[in-house]
Amino acid sequence: MTKILNPFYEFITDLIYFLGATGILARNIAIDLLTPPRYPRLLIDQIYHIGQKSLPLVIITSGSMGMVMSLQFGLGLEKFGGKFYVPKVLAVTVLREIGPMFTSLMLAARVGAGITAEIGSMVVTQQIDAIRALGTNPIKKIVIPRFLGCIISIPILCSLANIVGNLGGLIVGTSELNLDANFYILKIVTTVNLKDYLSGFFKTFFFASIISITACHFGLRVGNGTKAVGIATTRSVVVSCILILVCDFFLSKLFWLIEKWI
Amino acid sequence: MNIIEVKNFRKSFGPRVIHSDVSFVVKKGECLGLIGGSGTGKSVLLRSLIGLEKPDSGSIIIQGNEISSLPERELVNVRRRVAYAFQDGALFDSMTVYENLAYPLRAHFNMKESEIAERIQSQLNEFGLPEAGQLYPANLSGGMQKRIGLARAMIMNPEVVLYDEPTAGLDPFNTKRIQELILKLKAKGVSSILVTHDMPTAFAVCDDMVFLGGGKVIASGSINDLKNQADGPIQRFINGEL
């Protein structure tokens, strides 16, 4: 019986520990954000690394995603004579769900893994200790630039993914489903509204926080040796992806309630 | 006057007790050698002196201030006065040597960039690496990284320096250079603790020694007294019996 229960017990204790530690980290970020010194150059570096360097990944994945979805919707709806609904369905789905979530999952893998591996290596080579020993604060110098870099870059990348995703859909819609390009664009413009866009856009701030705080948490808590860096990186990506997927449901529900209320 | 006082220091990691009861003092301008076999917790003790590790119990008093219970934010003032020279330098690998040395100066002093550049150049000259400023740590040898690490630790003119094996892996010429630097700082009244296995360096620079073993101080005293004991801890350590 103990053998069966042990994994559950370990999971629960790990979960409680993770929530406590990330909660403390989030609190420290909030406190240190308000006080000097600030490192604007490091923030610009992070925006470059997180934002600009992720552009090819975001464009390729969101474009492919839009094309595949357009094709599947088209083939599925064609049976019921609903091929003409493809632009409407695709646009709303991409803006509200798939664009922000899919892009965030991609960035959790690319950016989250990078942050954890980099900070983990700094822990192993005592660079984080050196920051502390020199009387400076690793939260300000290491965590906050990465947190803000994600908060600034990820919503922009997700907005771009929305556009590219719909463009992918348009390409397949015109070439494979024989829909007229003007018709396709008109349907998108007349269907989607600001609420559809904002519902997805606001989620990205939560996803950016999840990616950056989880990645920094696992990076800062790396044990000894390079093997520990690998383990922490894997855990960081897995936990970020799970949290994004779970939070997406609750955020969708929350924004749905807010929309109804407004 | 005691600059550092460690009383009944106890530290464990899980069930493993590293130090059960360690006490010693360091006087102003004195260099204390912290000697012991590998795994006796010398570096853990040294890290605790600037709050990188928290003791389980006991007290650490630096310049009259109890630091073992201070929160991270209040340790900043202690760390400005107490420098820690890491064993492998712990240089920031994304920064050049110049940026590494400028980092503490920019963080703590309101200096002009020209003053920072001047201070860094004089520090590099003193450590025998006058042209290393624009190199990255990855372009330096292990010994050079160690010397830059020492240069960074000392650039804020600390009142206390904690050396974690500063001569390990260095050639005799650079070992001598580091010994001379420690002696030069001592002459200026800087107190220090030296963790080392390099006994010639310990003999050259230390005034007192503390031998650690089994989580406790097994011998302590002035270097001359310990050196003259025929079957004392120094001889047993050198002979590999301690």
Image (tube, rainbow, N blue to C red):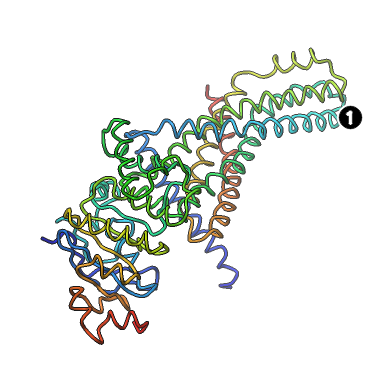
Q: In the displayed structure, does residue A166 sit left or right of residue B237?
A: right
Assign a secondary structure to mark 1: loop
**Occupied quadrant, residue B118:** top left
Which three-letter amino acid code belongs to the residue tagged 1?
A: Lys
- Residue A43 horizontal side relative to residue B201, left or right: right
The residue identified by callout 1 is A79
Residue A31, by quadrant, is: top left
Image position of A159 (left or right of A93): left
Q: Where does residue A245 sit, x and y in percent of width and height?
A: 61, 42
- Residue reaching furthest front? B173
Q: Residues within 10 Å of mark 1 (few under 14, many from 20)?
A: few
Q: Nearer the viewer, residue B76 or B141?
A: B141
Task: Name the quarter where the N terminus of chain A is drawn.
Answer: bottom right
* Nearer-the-camera pick, B135 or A250: B135
Image: A141 above or below A176: below
How many circles with numbers are drawn on the protein? 1
How far across and how far down the image is residue A19, in percent? 46, 50
Which chain does the numbered disc 1 sit on? A
Q: In the displayed structure, would residue B100 be above or below residue A60?
A: below
Residue B126 sits above or below residue B235 on the image: above
Q: Which residue is drawn at 80% across and 30% down?
A: A73
Residue A215's x, y, as percent? Answer: 52, 46
Foreground residue among A99 and A51: A51
- Residue at 33% x, 40% y is B121
Position of residue A101 measured from the top left corner of the image (x, y, whole percent): 63, 36
Q: Which residue lies furthest to the bottom in this view?
A: B231
* Front residue of this view, candidates B51 and A249: B51
Is B143 placed above or below B237 here? above
Identify the residue shown where x is 56% and y is 29%: A155
In the shown orientation, is residue A21 left or right of residue A156?
Answer: left
- Residue drawn at x 21%, y 75% is B220
